[in-house]
Image (cartoon, grey):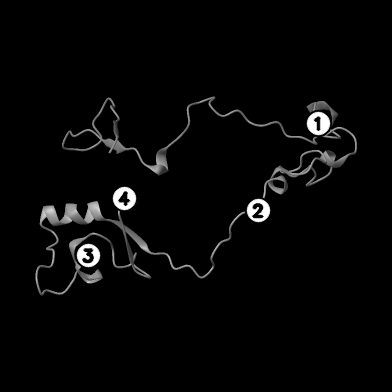
Amino acid sequence: ILATRQFSAAPASKDGREVVTYLGLNNLSDNPGAVKRGRRVGRGIGSSKGKTCGRGHKGQKARAGGGVSPLFEGGQTKFYKRIPKRGFKNNHAEAMVPLNVGTLQDYIDMGRLTPPSGDEDPLTMKDLVDAGVTKRSAVKYGIKLLGKG
């Protein structure tokens, strides 16, 4: 936490301690002259930006909300229309939580996860959540075990 000390001729408190003001969002301010006010347009001929307000006469860019879209290329076929369509997005795909085998091995080496041996039950998602490998709220559809994902 940043703190600025205010020194005055007389201490602010009766017991002689100095007042410390902490820097917070309520007392932040810019340096004087750091922000220049923008020119107000459409305020008469004496303002140098009156009447057409620097937009010129007529045309698409002079209108309110006017101007071409960022994708417009002057009549040339747009880039996103020139490239071929490829693949699709599966709307029914279920997002699985990725888990690397190396991460699983790290948790076993740390002792936070005990691998099943012999006739024990295999690792469950509850075991992984209890060990802290992933959060319970993150697992919605399951965990996908990856080699090196």
Q: Closer to us: mark 2 or mark 3?
A: 2
**Amino acid at dot 2:** Lys
Q: On screen, 130 above or below 107?
A: below
Quarter of the image for residue 58 reads: top right
Of marks 3 and 4, which one's residue comes earlier in the chain?
A: 3
* Residue 54 numbered mark, or none: 1
Spatial CA span between label 2 and label 3? 40 Å
Q: Residue at x 85, y 35 (%)?
A: 52
Whether residue 67 sits left or right of residue 96 in the image: it is right
Spatial CA span between label 1 and label 4? 58 Å
Mark 2, residue position: 85
Secondary structure of the residue carrying numbered label 3: helix
Q: Residue at x 36, y 41 (%)?
A: 24
* Residue 148 numbered mark, or none: 4
* Residue 128 numbered mark, or none: 3
Whether residue 5 sits left or right of residue 78 in the image: it is left
Counting from the top left corner in percent of width and height, residue 110 is at 12, 53
Of marks 4 and 2, which one's residue comes earlier in the chain?
A: 2
Spatial CA span between label 4 and label 2? 30 Å
**Amino acid at dot 1:** Gly
Give whichever of 25, 56 is nearer the camera: 56
Q: On screen, 122 above or below 48?
A: below
Spatial CA span between label 1 and label 2? 42 Å
Give the residue at the far front of this rendering.
118
